[in-house]
Image: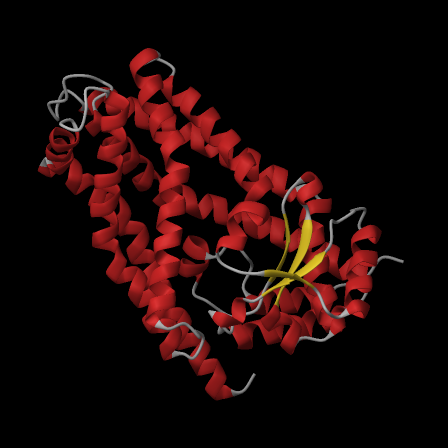
Amino acid sequence: MNELRMQDNKAYSRQKHRVAILSIILSPAILAIFVVSGVSLHVKNLASTASSNNYINLLGFYALIGFLYYAITVPLAYYSGFVLEHKFGLSNQRFKGWANREIKKSFISFIFGIPVVLAMYFFLKNWPLYWWFLTAVSCYFLSIFTAKFFPVLIVPLFYKYSPIKDSILKDKLIKLSQKAGFKVESVYEINISKDTNKANAALMGLGRQKRIVLCDTLLKNFSHEEIESVMAHELGHHSLRHILKLIISGGVSTAAAFFIANILLLRLHNILGYTRLYDFESLVLIFAVISFLNIFVMPLQNAFSRRLEHKADSFALEITDNKQAFIETMKKLASQNLADPNPSKFYEIMLYNHPPISRRISFAESFRTEK
């Protein structure tokens, strides 16, 4: 990687990292301000005029709070997702395309949040002692549903699937998946080049919905051996049951977060002047607590994820027996995605769910395939 490109990697990553840290801190701060300033109370009073049905009013409250939250955070999203990406030559989007994509993302988040908000309110009202556990279980099953149907329901809203045109590569990837013990539905490519120059690939879905998905930017710039290396890593996650482990660990951390939120809710709702445990404002307080706890949980989740990614790298090197292709893939991904090969330890702990590129390359260079 040439020196000029390395400087771009460092500059881009440094700015991205700062924005990411700011976003992590900003989320609980905004929700806490909504709580202590009385914004959530005013919004509840406004939403409560909509009807005599509390659940309909709750949806109005959720929509208004969500809109206020988004209005405050959208400038940061614009800077991170549009300005920076264009500044470093990574984005192909016009502003209209970026705005449409943001609206879609926000609408999808809103829709997926509805059952969580309604369930939480219902459980708080009817089972106040166990609401935290019941809500955590609901979130757990929602995460399974999302993982299973994400490639079928969500991805097509943003990108167009098309069967891969390279029949030789298709056969290689299907054989590779069979070697790893998986039967995939098919091999697809998606047109992310309309938005970005970054490259990636994935084995999406669960059960019969599993499909190999390659970005057109990957197909354009990487060799067959390098693409096989990328896909072998993704197959490693499934073969080693990493998806299940992540879902379970996510469920445990979610339950722990709701349990702590319940303790703080019981202590704070009287101080804040809430008349009932299931007041609409309680929901904002709960999400504020969970967002704050996320600052401390995220490093643990990232550490666990980095460990799984390391194991997936080992699987890829073992099954392909081509460490040079793996090394070249890492170098190309770092260059094309402007990834910092050597981030600071703080940013690695807080933000990285993959090992840094330099460490992955060093591991591959010293890897010995078992014969």
- In this rendering, would 216 be left or right of 324? left
Q: Is residue 137 above or below residue 243?
A: above
- In this rendering, would 61 be left or right of 335? left
**In terms of depth relative to the viewer, which is nearer, 310 or 39?**
39
- Residue at image coords 68%, 51%: 211
Q: Which residue is situated farthest in the right direction here?
A: 371
**In terms of depth relative to the viewer, which is nearer, 15 or 367?**
15
- In this rendering, would 214 be left or right of 30? right
Number of disc labels:
0
Q: In which quadrant is the C terminus drawn?
A: bottom right
Q: Is residue 267 above or below residue 186?
A: above
User: Picture quarter containing residue 116?
Assistant: top left
Position of residue 331 measured from the top left corner of the image (x, y, whole percent): 61, 75
Position of residue 136 measured from the top left corner of the image (x, y, whole percent): 44, 27
- Residue at image coords 21%, 53%: 72
Q: Which residue is situated farthest in the front direction here?
A: 51
Q: Is residue 167 visible?
A: yes
Q: Is residue 347 above or below residue 334?
A: above
Snapshot colouring: secondary structure
Q: In which quadrant is the N terminus drawn?
A: bottom right
- Residue at image coords 49%, 49%: 302
Q: Is residue 340 visible?
A: no
User: Picture quarter containing residue 202?
Assistant: bottom right
Position of residue 82 measured from the top left corner of the image (x, y, whole percent): 35, 69
Position of residue 198 measured from the top left corner of the image (x, y, whole percent): 52, 70
**In terms of depth relative to the viewer, which is nearer, 310 or 166?**
166
- Residue at image coords 56%, 33%: 248
- In this rendering, would 131 be left or right of 148? left
